[in-house]
Image (tube, rainbow, N blue to C red):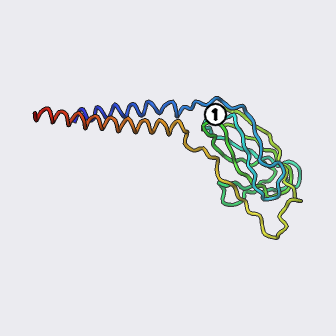
Amino acid sequence: MKKTLAALALAGSIALIGSAPAVAGTYPPLPPQAAVSDGTVGPGESFVFRGQGMQPFETITITVTPGNPPAASGATFGGTSVVGKIPVFLAPQTFSATADAQGAFAYPLAISEAGTYSITATGNTSGVTVGPVTVTVAASLANTGGAPLATTGGGLANTGADSGLVLWTIVGAGALAAGAASVVVVRRRAKTEAAA
């Protein structure tokens, strides 16, 4: 029993030690920059604000600032993490996002009032700021079909599992299986030798 526990502990240690480099990330830092998927949109039309240059998995504050009237008189914003629309009265509106393993992010937005808006993102740990990026919401691009435009988005940024983490998890599981198999083989040999 002691040999079994020792073999499993050794295999588990190998798995845990091997996963540390994958969690830390081995990506070179990306240069700070930001962009939007479309610089001119209709009221309520979704677009994606993307950026990079943050620390891996850092939380980010995205700030949308109303510019020219009529937006400054009370625009409403919507994000995929918000069920309804959020009213904004002459003040910037902020949203939260999380960077991926490379320090990049993508956040869907929809602005329902015409005007010009400035969008920036700031890393809450690093203090790195990207932007401003200007988006124009043109009333001339409004949906004329009579149906109201919904505030929709494509979901949160895909921060998924790091491929290195998956690889080290598989290696760790293999090491555990190999350790367990070696314990079984040693026990069978010991029984065979004892019986002989």
Quadrant of the snapshot with the N terminus: top left
Q: Quadrant of residue 9?
A: top left
State the residue at coordinates (73%, 63%). Answer: 150
State the residue at coordinates (73%, 59%). Answer: 151
- For the residue pair 74 and 40, the one nearer the viewer reads as 40
* Three-letter amino acid code at the position of disc 1: Gln
Q: Quadrant of residue 105?
A: top right
State the residue at coordinates (64%, 47%). Answer: 157
Quadrant of the snapshot with the C terminus: top left
How dense is the environment of label 1, judged by Cα within 10 Å: few (below 14), some, or many (20 and up)?
many
As drawn, 91 above or below 150: above
As drawn, 159 above or below 149: above
Q: Residue furthest front?
A: 196
Q: Position of residue 178 (x, y in %)?
A: 34, 36
Q: Position of residue 83 (x, y in %)?
A: 66, 60
As drawn, 96 above or below 21: below
Q: Position of residue 64 (x, y in %)?
A: 77, 47
Instruction: Count the labels in the image.
Output: 1
As drawn, 25 above or below 49: above
Q: Position of residue 110 (x, y in %)?
A: 75, 55
Q: Please indicate whether residue 90 sits to the left or right of residue 30 in the image.
A: right
Q: Please indicate whether residue 84 sits to the left or right of residue 17 in the image.
A: right
Residue assigned mark 1: 55
Q: Residue furthest left?
A: 196
- For the residue pair 16 and 178, the one nearer the viewer reads as 178
